[in-house]
């Protein structure tokens, strides 16, 4: 699992708490650190051969960044890497994100166990 | 006193306690223990306490507080509390406090383009705001122009785009900045640029510096741990921030060029006591840089404010503010030898929050009102309040008006502000104030032993405190130990409503276009000369504000100026720890 912050949004407590929670749930987790470009996130995901990328966004720039990451993944033959998003994302944007290949959106306030269960199921699906 | 003692003695109370010099504490302590055992425990054995009453900062709350608790803490009225406007300022930074003027009604606002945001500012002032703090978008805060690659999708998103002085002029067009109590912005990593922009704006208006007041957050050190808009490595960033204070001491001593922040550190997980300790260590670092330059503590300290924060426990809010003023006063006097009242009387900025939830956002009106009331009962100087939809997006016009009205209700209705420090003397609040003071000082000692502000960033102590705390909070919410209505009590599925404020989709293109026009119209030779002046100050270590002011007046952009700093000082390296 790669936990990523894209763009200039500097609020990474949520990302770090989720990363730690998934680590505690027994997953292998990498965190990109702040202020990454979509290109850097995709490169890191391919290098580390992750099953899932989780992008945390609270600045309102979610559509542009998430869609670009999905497109880059698909272009680089990594269509099997699941992309999930977390943070503050308006309800009306969720269908467009899901249609564009973001497999799940977890809003602020979601229990970590729910995210962990989902990520584990995705990783297992990829293995089988 | 002796007469009362005699009278008490005749009623069979013990004589003066030799250890504390107080009368009757032993008797009260004994009675309180009896009550707890015979009455309280007797009842709670049948009906158990509904939860463990532990505050977010880890202090346990007792069922009841009595004078014995104050005696145990060695409470001494004259030396611990004193009087408002007098050392150690526990009861207030000014003598008359809210009886002459309530706290300054303040609004933090900004979005989209400057011309559009100007309309919002005018409305805020109509609704009674006395101070406007401009929310800047992330590209501006991080030192990028609106047309930079890193600005993609972020222009105007969490604040207004401010690339050049032209944007600042449009932002305050038609607004009499000398009629507003204070104007300002955060500008944590671009302090000299925003200070120069406000100075240049006043100059364009023909105002003397004494005719308007500028307030900046300009506290870059906490960005590395908590907020994330850092540009440079921490050491030069702190130098640039302290340059702003030095320049104001020399030119505009009535301005407030630095607000040292607790709030982002606490919000991020540190808890208010540890967050306060880190903020104090940051203040100590900035002050050290200024003293090294030859300024005195009496020149510097009056220009510094602190942005206090506690958002989980109402009574901790009040006690934290009172403890912070006392700690600051004693630190200025005992550690630095300050002699001026203004150097010891800490002015505090606060931003009323609660545990705001995404679901049923109107409930956040109640939460933020209580949070703000706590700060007012604690004697805050400059008060902001979160809008009920602020956890979701830039506040809408309705929500920010409701927020301002809430402040005004607290300022003027219910008698909240009629007497000074109304909870002073409360057994609970005074006990809490003492315990929080001790907690902050212990944490500050830990920070200083670890090497102080810069080491806390590099060695990761700050981030560790934040992550530990954030995890602890998350677990407390998941387990229900920290009750949260609509989240773990009567839970509702979180969702972000579609009514969330949105900026115009053309905003980014229009802002970039305007920047191109400004660049085309300016005197390029003057810009080049001014930017060379910035290079020169980077090399010599001279105060960065004068050359930045020259560059800003030549319409050099935020990105162009910050780029000079990046080239000279290098950039921060993001931590991948979690």
Image: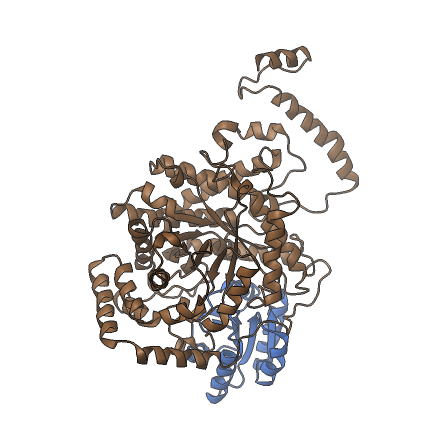
Q: Check the image and report above or below for B260 versus A99.
A: above
Horizontal and vertical percent position of residue B456: 39, 53
Observer-nearest residue: B319 or B494? Answer: B319
Q: Which residue is at the front of the view, B1 or B97?
A: B97
Q: Could you say where residue B365 lies in the image, as x and y percent from the top left? A: 65, 58
At horizontal 29% and vertical 42% (from top left) the residue drawn is B296
- Closer to the camera in the image, B312 or B564: B564
Q: Position of residue A123 (x, y in %)?
A: 57, 77
- From the top left corner, tell me how far across and down residue B496 is, in percent: 63, 70
Q: Quadrant of residue B64?
A: top right
Q: Quadrant of residue B213?
A: bottom left
Q: How is the image coloured?
A: by chain
Q: Colour of chain B?
A: brown
- Residue farthest to the right? B46
Q: State which quarter of the image contains the N terminus of chain B.
A: top right
Q: Is residue A118 left or right of residue B83?
A: right
In this figure, what is the number of numbered marks? 0
Shown colour of chain A: blue
Q: Is residue A118 left or right of residue B545?
A: right
Q: Camera-side residue: B183 or B506?
A: B183
Residue B174 visible in this rendered orientation of the protein: yes
The answer to whether residue A128 is seen in the rendering is no
């Amino acid at each position: 699992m790669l936990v990523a912050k894209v763009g200039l949004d500097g609020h990474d407590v949520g990302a770090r708490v989720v990363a730690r929670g998934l680590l505690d749930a027994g997953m292998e987790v990498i965190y990109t650190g702040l202020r990454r470009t979509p290109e850097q996130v995709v490169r890191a995901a391919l290098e580390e051969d992750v099953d899932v990328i989780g992008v945390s966004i609270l600045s309102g720039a979610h559509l542009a960044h998430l869609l670009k990451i999905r497109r880059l993944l698909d272009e680089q033959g990594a269509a099997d890497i699941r992309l999930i998003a977390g943070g503050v994302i308006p309800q009306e944007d969720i269908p467009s994100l899901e249609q564009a290949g973001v497999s799940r959106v977890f809003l602020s306030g979601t229990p970590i166990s729910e995210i962990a269960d989902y990520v584990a199921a995705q990783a297992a699906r990829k293995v089988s | 006193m002796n007469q009362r003692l005699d009278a008490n003695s005749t009623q069979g109370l013990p004589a003066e306690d030799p250890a504390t010099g107080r009368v009757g504490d032993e008797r009260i302590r004994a009675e309180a223990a009896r009550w707890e055992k015979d009455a309280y425990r007797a009842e709670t054995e049948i009906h158990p306490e509904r939860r463990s009453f532990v505050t977010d900062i880890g202090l346990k709350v007792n069922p009841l507080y009595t004078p014995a608790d104050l005696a145990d803490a060695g409470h001494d009225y004259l030396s611990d509390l004193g009087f408002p406007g007098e050392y150690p300022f526990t009861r207030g930074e000014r003598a008359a406090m809210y009886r002459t003027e309530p706290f300054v009604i303040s609004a933090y606002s900004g979005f989209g383009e400057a011309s559009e945001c100007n309309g919002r500012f005018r409305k805020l002032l109509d609704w009674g705001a006395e101070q406007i703090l401009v929310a800047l978008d992330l590209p501006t805060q991080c030192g990028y122009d609106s047309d930079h690659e890193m600005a993609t999708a972020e222009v105007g998103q969490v604040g207004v785009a401010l690339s050049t002085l032209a944007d600042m002029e449009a932002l305050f067009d038609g607004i009499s900045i000398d009629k507003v109590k204070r104007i300002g912005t955060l500008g944590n990593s671009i302090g000299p640029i925003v200070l120069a922009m406000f100075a240049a704006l006043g100059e364009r208006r023909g105002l003397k510096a004494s005719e308007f007041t500028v307030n900046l957050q300009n506290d870059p050190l906490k960005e590395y741990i908590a907020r994330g808009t850092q540009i440079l490595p921490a050491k030069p960033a702190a130098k640039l921030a302290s340059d702003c204070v030095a320049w104001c001491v020399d030119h505009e001593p009535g301005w407030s060029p630095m607000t040292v922040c607790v709030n982002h550190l606490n919000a991020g997980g540190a808890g208010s006591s540890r967050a306060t300790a880190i903020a104090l260590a940051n203040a100590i670092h900035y002050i050290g840089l200024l003293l090294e330059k030859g300024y005195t503590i009496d020149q510097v300290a009056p220009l510094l404010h602190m942005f206090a924060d506690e958002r989980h426990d109402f009574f901790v809010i009040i006690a934290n503010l009172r403890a912070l003023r006392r700690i600051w006063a004693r630190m200025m006097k005992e550690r630095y030898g300050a002699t001026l009242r203004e150097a010891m009387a800490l002015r505090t900025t606060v931003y009323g929050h609660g545990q705001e939830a995404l679901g049923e956002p109107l409930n956040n009106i109640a939460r933020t009102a209580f949070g703000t009331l706590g700060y007012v009962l604690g004697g805050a100087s400059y008060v902001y309040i979160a809008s009920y939809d602020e956890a979701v997006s830039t506040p809408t016009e309705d929500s920010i008006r409701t927020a301002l009205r809430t402040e005004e209700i607290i300022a003027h209705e219910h008698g909240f502000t009629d007497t000074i420090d109304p909870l002073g003397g409360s057994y609970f609040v005074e006990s809490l104030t003492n315990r929080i003071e001790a907690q902050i000082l212990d944490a500050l000692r830990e920070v200083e032993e670890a090497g102080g502000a810069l080491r806390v960033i590099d060695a990761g102590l700050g981030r560790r405190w934040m992550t530990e705390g954030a995890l602890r909070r998350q677990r407390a919410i998941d387990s229900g130990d920290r009750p949260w209505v609509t989240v773990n009590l009567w839970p509702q599925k979180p969702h972000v409503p579609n009514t969330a404020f949105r900026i115009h989709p053309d905003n980014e293109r229009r802002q970039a276009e305007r920047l191109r026009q400004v660049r085309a119209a300016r005197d390029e030779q003057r810009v080049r000369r001014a930017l060379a002046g910035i290079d020169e100050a980077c090399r010599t270590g001279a105060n960065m504000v004068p050359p930045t002011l020259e560059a800003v007046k030549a319409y050099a952009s935020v990105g162009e100026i910050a780029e000079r700093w990046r080239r000279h000082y290098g950039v921060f390296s993001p931590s991948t720890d979690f």
